[in-house]
Amino acid sequence: MTYNRSLVIGLVFVLGSLVLSAWLYPHLPETMPQRWDAAGNVVAYGPRSQLVFLMPAIIAFTWVLLIVLPRLSPHGFRIDP
């Protein structure tokens, strides 16, 4: 897979998750469960604005990290033979 093709695929995932989150946003309750204990009981609630867009933010951060890290590596993550 070429570098440009992988960039486009990553961008599609980021934009797709953002569009899906924006589409689901009005259908969700104002407060949503945020954390659970070991028994499965809800421990904390959070606003939907933070929770819905958290996953697209994580996907975008990971995508940018995977683009930037090879450029920061002194040997480009290559192993000497």
Image (tube, rainbow, N blue to C red):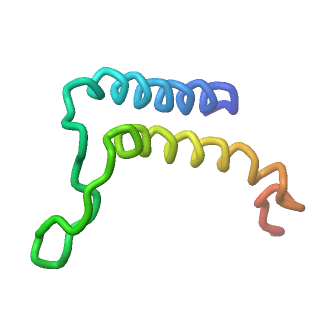
Give the camera-side residue of 9 and 31: 31
Q: Is residue 6 left or right of residue 43?
A: right
From what the image shows, is residue 12 above or below residue 60?
above
Which percent across, then down, holds residue 13?
A: 46, 31
Quadrant of residue 31 within the rendered picture: top left
Give the camera-side residue of 60 and 8: 60
Outermost right residue: 74
Which percent across, then down, holds residue 58?
A: 50, 47
Q: How many labels does the image show?
A: 0
Q: Quadrant of the C terminus?
A: bottom right
Residue at 11% across / 70% down in the picture?
A: 40
Residue at 63% across / 30% down in the picture?
A: 7
Which percent across, then down, holds residue 56?
A: 46, 38
Q: Is residue 37 left or right of residue 53?
A: left
Residue at 57% across / 48% down in the picture?
A: 62
Q: In which quarter of the image is the N terminus?
A: top right
Outermost bottom residue: 38
Give the camera-side residue of 47 and 37: 47
Which percent across, then down, holds residue 72?
A: 84, 55
Give the camera-side residue of 5 and 17: 17
Q: Is residue 59 left or right of residue 20?
A: right
Quadrant of residue 80 within the rendered picture: bottom right
From what the image shows, is residue 62 above or below residue 78?
above
Residue at 78% across / 66% down in the picture?
A: 79
